Image (cartoon, rainbow, N blue to C red):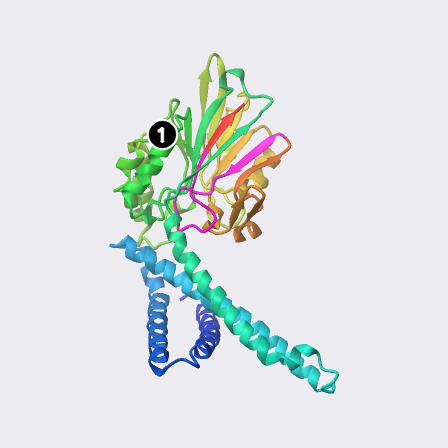
Amino acid sequence: MKRGGPMMFVIALLVLALFEYYTISSLLYMVSNASPAVKYTALTIYAVLTITWFVFFFMMPSMRGTVPTNKLVMNIGAVFFMGFLLMKALIFLFLFIDDAVRFFSWISSLFFSKEEMPQLVQKGMTRKVFMQKAAILFGGLTLGTFIYGMANRYRYNIKRMQIAFEHLPAAFKGLKIVHISDIHSGSFNNTEAVARGVQLINDQQPDLIFFTGDLVNNRANEMDDYISVFNKLKAKTGIYSILGNHDYGDYISWGSDEAKSQNLDQLKAVHKKMGWNLLLNEHISLDKDGEQIAIIGVENTSAKGFHSYGDLSKAYRGAADVPFKILLSHDPSHWDAEVRTAFGDIALTLSGHTHGMQFGIDLPWLKWSPVQYMYKQWAGLYQEGKQFLYVNRGFGFLGYPGRVGILPEITVLELT
């Protein structure tokens, strides 16, 4: 176990104990006036769910990196694990805040007479009842929302956008690009649903398709059932791809460096089998009517602590004279960290990685997700001066097998 591991484990157990105390207290209150049969049934169901949750809690470390034999069961288990935990966390938050208010109110009672006491203290019991009911309501709604989100994991959303550039060569005006990212095939359990997403892409009749990394969760063989699905993608001028942080297999144990290296070689071969042109710190030039644009592809490069393998200087070398450049870079933090500061002539950067955290609000007039507190650019189009960045919300899903508010995305960009 890593240094600090035992202490973190103890802290996690203490936090879970607090969650459990507040949740069971609320449940006991809710059934306090019920018949013995109802009480017994409610407590039994809760006990079974809690024991199941703890089994997942202790088994998850040993399950990490394995290829599940039944992905549907694993997906349901993951939703239950996260939803049940968040439900208890919200119940704890509601009631702990109330207890804190009551504690400080009690402290104030030591210094004030009853007549001088804030009305809040004198009506504490009423407030406590309200907070218990609100906690149960919000906790239950949260769990229900997570369950509902499973229905959205294959609900592909097409985002259309035109971007105007002053120096786009005339021959490429109207160029239609489909941008997808973060397939995470190891999470899929429905080839027909994924095939419908592929057909949606082909229906756009794109000139180019760009894939910006994370084809798998860890292992190349996660694509075994999906090569025949994604090799049906068609684009008039070609399909170009790069690697994302998950493609290198950094998050599981391989037993040897050789095994890990072989997995990466197999994954590169998968790109080739599908007819995708994998760009590994390199660029290609596209010619049309005597004019050129450059497609630059870098391996994963992160300013947020993820492993970096990219070399933009190497990929850029020889492209300086090409008047218009598009960069494929998986992690959007790369844009501020290097692209804007050192490569000001890269007109458009395409990224993914964030998934929009698969949770948030995505409306024309309001866009929010917890991931925005880590990533300044996390979904959609961004502009600084004459440079643009587009962050795709992801085609697949990872961890939580669903989407709440942030749907899987197929981006259609038209350059004008």
**Location of residue 93 (image quadrant):** bottom right
For the image shown, how many numbered marks are present on the structure? Answer: 1
Q: Position of residue 145 (x, y in %)?
A: 43, 57
Tell me, yes or no, if residue 126 can be seen here.
yes
The amino acid pointed to by label 1 is: Asn
Q: State left or right for residue 355 relative to residue 189.
A: right
Task: Please tell me which residue lies in front, 404 or 189.
Answer: 404
Q: Nearer the viewer, residue 55 or 114?
A: 114
Magenta residues, start to end: 386-411
Q: Quick check: 173 left or right of 208?
A: right
Q: Which quadrant would residue 228 be assigned to in this image?
A: top left
Q: Is residue 11 above or below residue 338?
A: below
Describe the element under mark 1 as helix, strand or loop: helix
Measuring from the top left, give residue 19's x and y in whole percent.
Answer: 47, 72
In this orientation, which residue lies closer to the viewer: 86 or 169? Answer: 86
Prevailing secondary structure of the magenta residues: loop
Determine if residue 277 is in view.
no
The answer to whether 389 is drawn above or below residue 87 in the figure is above
Residue 355's spot in the image, x, y percent?
46, 46
Nearer to us in this view, 355 or 408? 408
User: Would you say 58 lies left or right of 108 here?
Assistant: left
Q: Position of residue 236 (x, y in %)?
A: 38, 22
266 vs 189: above or below: above
Is residue 405 on the magenta stretch? yes
Q: Residue at x 57, y 33 (%)?
A: 388
**Residue at x-position 60% and y-position 22%:** 166
Quarter placement of the N terminus: bottom left
**Residue annotated with mark 1:** 202
Q: Is residue 323 magenta?
A: no
